[in-house]
Image: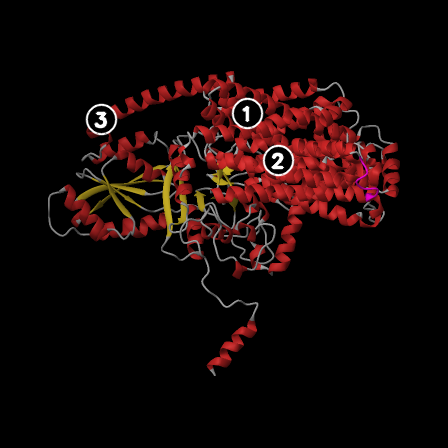
């Protein structure tokens, strides 16, 4: 209570301070608008001003040139070296400008001269005329070239973006046996084009925004206008617009800022590295949030079931896909509960274990010094260490780690009498099962330890209470207003949860996520009944 | 006016009732201690009397569709008597929660953790229940269907597994007990597991349903629960016979006898888990109702702030309620049914009669 009270006070103070600041900011631009921010007629003052605004950085290149008949006009190009494509500048700006001859011998009238440059000289598709210097700075920083002319109180921002980028390749985190092998890259435009190529619909809405005071990261929302739920899109947009932060370096930042429950162990925003996954989610009415500089695209809202769905479920045969999905669920349960169940069995309920197995376990436990809980905890922790090390270490060393993991941690620990063999088996199964559901792997390792503790205190009662708590917690979670645990409630979302029903039965888009245009497939001949078709043909004859 | 803004559907309401009945019915030792192998008859009679009681509740729900029990009292008896009745019922709800919590603790101590102190078990349960209560009625209602269906499935499976142990001579000798025992047994069944449905009068304003659906949901839910209880009792008698009253939890002993090959022996743990889940559900509903009643008496809408304090109170109350398990079961068999009859039957009945004579609610004509 006290904590709440204090935090509310702090929030209020912060809010008040912010308001004061914004008041001050509001007053400032009115005074200085004309004097400081606008582009002036003198070329030199513009250039020096731009330099100052970019804190005299050495990678800002200024290129002076002369154009018009006999070079009667002077101008300058400003760009940041490395962000621009030099060939583009040469081909589309400099070459045309050197050969351009102004129509008439006119005084450098700002409007006409600039329009002439745009309409007759430049060969670029993306030119924007600006009047303010901050726009020029932003253009420079995002890889555009700014063109000033002597005597013109305006400037041109010409798109010449061209930095080194990775080509589209197979994603490391989501590999498939069957299905497209392309993955998102770090480039925002490449990513949007990858999705656009999957969904060629005019209703696919793309919305850009810039977030981050310092990083000015480009962020792009993509969704199907006629399918997306209006509540969800309103929530997402309002949360994104409120963001006033220094930096957005990866989509994880956005995820944490806009999540419903940032402190929960369960992720309520999904992510993917594959365009076909993102397209599938968009088609179900979700919103894709693409952040420049990372191949991980966020999808919102996310349901709990989505962690168990993979793209291949929809590309392989329905029965096999359903079987695999059930396997994933069982794997998920194993990876949370297996150590807990083992502890509760060996500490409290030995009578359930079949007698022969009981003897084996008792034999193994005889030589070990620690209680089962401690033993299991050590092994689980050791596994987490090996896993973390395996991710961070350079690849050649990974081999060594796996040998250490397999031999020292497993075999040697048992023969040295530190842990019993059954514990090693249980932890091994637990560890392998965790990889079946990669997107829940964070929540799993926390819940597992909690379950182990509960089981070691109160046996199956603890496990039952723990799982009830998890269920209730999942039931109370929401993702952008959509109930997180919804895939298991009694509506048509069930078609795509525990099992993956045949595609032709999934007529409707998921409930709560899609709104309007609910039906996703038209009337099709049911593939299950080919003989009906033949009857129809007979009638025709 | 509603304190909790959440709504549940009529179907969830129905299954919540079923769940509520199933949970208390699965602990049948109250009855089997009195009537032994004739308990099935008592359950049947109890169900019939309970239908009468349900009719009273239904009537109240229809006459006051958007008022909970305490609001109904205030409207019929005026502010002062209404408040007094409200306090009495708050005490009733707290006692019910505490009693069920003790049941849960005793059961767990018996089956799983003999050496763990009771307060740990109770505290764990109430902490988890607090999550559910804070989530509101729509979170609680969400799981009613699943729990109830799982309970029915488990009961059916376990019955099939003990088919070989059943002996129908175990029902004999029937109808040989003194008649007063049957009356006592019926009274217990009506008052303790079935009559506790009165707490749903605190929940019904949050249910989206028409008058017709109220009747349907109330009765189908009740019958579903009663049938489960009936099946369990029949099964236990068929397997154990008249030694049933020796055991605290006859169902566990029954399932202990189930032997499905070597590797599947001792499946009573499954039963124990589902029983714990059902009992937990019942405690959550009672706890929720206590909190709502408390919020109503204190005239606050921020019922979530009361959750933890009410929980602490329930824990302490349940720790001090009975000195021993024997005292608990004696009072369950002899004292409590009489006390509960007042709360569950007489006061609602009087309320509905008074409401009719006062003719104050205009909805009655509509």
- The chief SS type of the magenta part is loop
Question: Looking at the picture, how far across and down is residue B304, in whole percent?
Answer: 52, 25
Give the label, 3 or 1, closer to the camera: 1
* Residue labelled with disc 1: B291
- Image mark for residue A504: none
Callout in the foreground (1, 2): 1
Q: Is residue B280 visible?
A: yes
Foreground residue among A99 and A56: A56
Q: Secondary structure at mark 1?
A: helix
Q: Residue at x 61, y 26 (%)?
A: B342
Disc 3 and disc 2: Cα gap in Å? 57 Å
Q: Residues within 10 Å of mark 2 (few under 14, many from 20)?
A: some
Marker disc for residue A32: 3
Q: Position of residue A517 (x, y in %)?
A: 41, 54
Q: Position of residue B12 (x, y in %)?
A: 55, 41
Which residue is nearer to you in this view: B64 or B327? B64
Tell me which segment is drawn in magenta. B171-177
Asked if labels 2 and 3 touch by Cβ distance under 8 angstroms, the answer is no
Is residue B14 depicted above or below A196 in this figure?
A: above
């Amino acid at each position: 209570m006290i904590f709440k009270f204090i935090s509310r006070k702090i929030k209020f103070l912060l809010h008040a301070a912010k308001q004061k600041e914004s008041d001050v900011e509001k007053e400032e631009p009115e005074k200085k608008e004309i004097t400081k921010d606008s582009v002036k007629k003198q070329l030199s003052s513009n250039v020096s001003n731009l330099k100052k605004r970019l804190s005299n950085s050495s990678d800002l290149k200024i290129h002076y040139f002369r154009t018009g008949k006999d070079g009667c006009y002077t101008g300058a190009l400003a760009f940041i070296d490395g962000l621009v494509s030099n060939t583009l500048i040469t081909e589309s700006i400099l070459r045309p400008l050197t050969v351009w001859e102004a129509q008439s011998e006119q005084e450098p009238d700002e409007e006409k001269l600039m329009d002439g440059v745009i309409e007759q000289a430049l060969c670029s598709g993306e030119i924007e005329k600006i009047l303010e210097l901050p726009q020029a700075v932003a253009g420079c920083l995002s890889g555009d070239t700014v063109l000033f002319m002597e005597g013109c109180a305006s400037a041109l921002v010409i798109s010449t973006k061209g930095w080194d980028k990775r080509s589209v390749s197979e994603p490391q985190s989501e590999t498939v046996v069957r299905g497209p092998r392309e993955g998102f890259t770090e480039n925002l435009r490449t990513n949007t084009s990858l999705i656009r190529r999957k969904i060629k619909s005019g209703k696919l809405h793309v919305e850009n925004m810039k977030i981050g005071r310092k990083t000015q990261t480009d962020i792009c929302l993509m969704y199907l206008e006629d399918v997306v739920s209006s509540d969800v899109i309103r929530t997402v947009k309002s949360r994104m617009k409120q963001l006033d932060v220094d930096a957005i370096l990866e989509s994880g930042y956005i995820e944490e800022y806009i999540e419903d429950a940032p402190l929960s162990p369960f992720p309520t925003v999904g992510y993917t590295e594959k365009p076909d996954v993102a397209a599938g989610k968009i088609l179900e009415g979700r919103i894709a949030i693409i952040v420049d500089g990372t191949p991980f695209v966020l999808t919102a809202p996310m349901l709990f079931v989505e962690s168990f769905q993979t793209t291949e479920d929809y590309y392989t045969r329905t029965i096999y896909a359903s079987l695999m999905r059930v396997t994933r669920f069982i794997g998920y349960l194993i990876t949370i509960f297996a150590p807990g169940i083992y502890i509760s069995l060996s500490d409290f309920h030995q009578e359930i274990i079949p007698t022969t197995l009981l003897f084996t376990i008792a034999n193994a436990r005889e030589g070990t010094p620690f209680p089962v809980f401690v033993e299991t905890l050590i092994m689980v922790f050791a596994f987490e260490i090996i896993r973390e090390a395996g991710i961070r270490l350079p690849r050649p060393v990974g081999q060594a780690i796996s040998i250490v993991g397999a031999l020292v941690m497993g075999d040697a620990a048992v023969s040295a009498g530190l842990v019993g063999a059954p514990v090693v088996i249980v932890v091994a199964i637990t560890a392998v099962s965790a990889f079946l559901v990669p997107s829940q792997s964070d929540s799993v390792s926390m819940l597992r330890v909690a379950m182990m503790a509960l089981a070691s205190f109160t046996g199956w009662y603890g496990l039952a209470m723990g799982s009830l708590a998890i269920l209730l917690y999942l039931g109370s979670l929401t993702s952008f207003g959509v109930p997180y645990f919804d895939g298991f409630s009694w509506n048509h979302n069930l078609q795509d949860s525990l099992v993956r029903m045949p595609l032709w039965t999934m007529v409707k888009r998921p409930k709560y996520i899609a709104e309007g245009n609910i039906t996703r497939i038209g009337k099709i001949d049911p593939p299950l009944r080919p003989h009906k078709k033949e009857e129809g043909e007979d009638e025709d004859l | 006016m509603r304190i909790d803004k959440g709504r549940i559907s009529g179907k969830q309401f129905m299954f919540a009732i079923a769940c509520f009945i199933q949970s208390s019915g699965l602990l049948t030792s109250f009855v089997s201690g009195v009537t032994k192998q004739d308990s099935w008859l008592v359950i049947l009679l109890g169900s019939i009397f309970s239908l009468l009681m349900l009719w009273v509740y239904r009537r109240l729900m229809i006459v006051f569709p958007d008022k909970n029990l305490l609001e109904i009292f205030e409207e019929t008896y005026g502010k002062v008597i209404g408040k007094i009745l409200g306090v009495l019922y708050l005490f009733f709800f707290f006692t019910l929660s505490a009693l069920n919590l003790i049941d849960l603790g005793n059961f767990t101590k018996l089956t799983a953790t003999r050496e763990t102190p009771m307060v740990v078990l109770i505290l764990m349960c109430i902490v988890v229940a607090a999550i559910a209560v804070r989530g509101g009625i729509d979170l609680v209602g969400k799981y009613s269907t699943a729990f109830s269906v799982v309970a029915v499935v488990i009961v059916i499976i376990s019955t099939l597994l003990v088919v070989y142990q059943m002996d129908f001579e175990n029902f004999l000798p029937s109808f040989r007990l003194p008649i007063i025992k049957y009356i006592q047994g019926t009274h217990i069944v009506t008052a303790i597991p079935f009559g506790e449905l009165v707490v749903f009068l605190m929940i019904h304003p949050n249910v989206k349903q028409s008058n017709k659906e109220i009747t349907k949901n109330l009765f189908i839910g009740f019958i579903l629960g009663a049938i489960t209880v009936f099946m369990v009792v029949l099964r236990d008698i068929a397997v154990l016979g008249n030694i049933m009253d020796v055991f605290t939890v006859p169902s566990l002993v029954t399932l202990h006898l189930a032997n499905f090959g070597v590797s599947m022996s001792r499946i009573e743990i499954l039963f124990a888990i589902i029983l714990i889940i059902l009992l937990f559900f019942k405690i959550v509903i009672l706890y929720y109702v206590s909190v709502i009643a408390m919020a109503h008496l204190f005239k606050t809408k921020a019922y979530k702030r009361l959750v933890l304090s009410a929980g602490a109170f329930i824990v302490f109350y349940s720790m001090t309620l009975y000195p021993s398990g024997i005292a608990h079961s004696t009072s369950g068999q002899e004292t409590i049914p009489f006390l509960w009859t007042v709360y569950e039957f007489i006061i609602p009945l009087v309320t509905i009669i008074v409401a009719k004579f006062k003719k104050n609610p205009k909805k009655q004509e509509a």
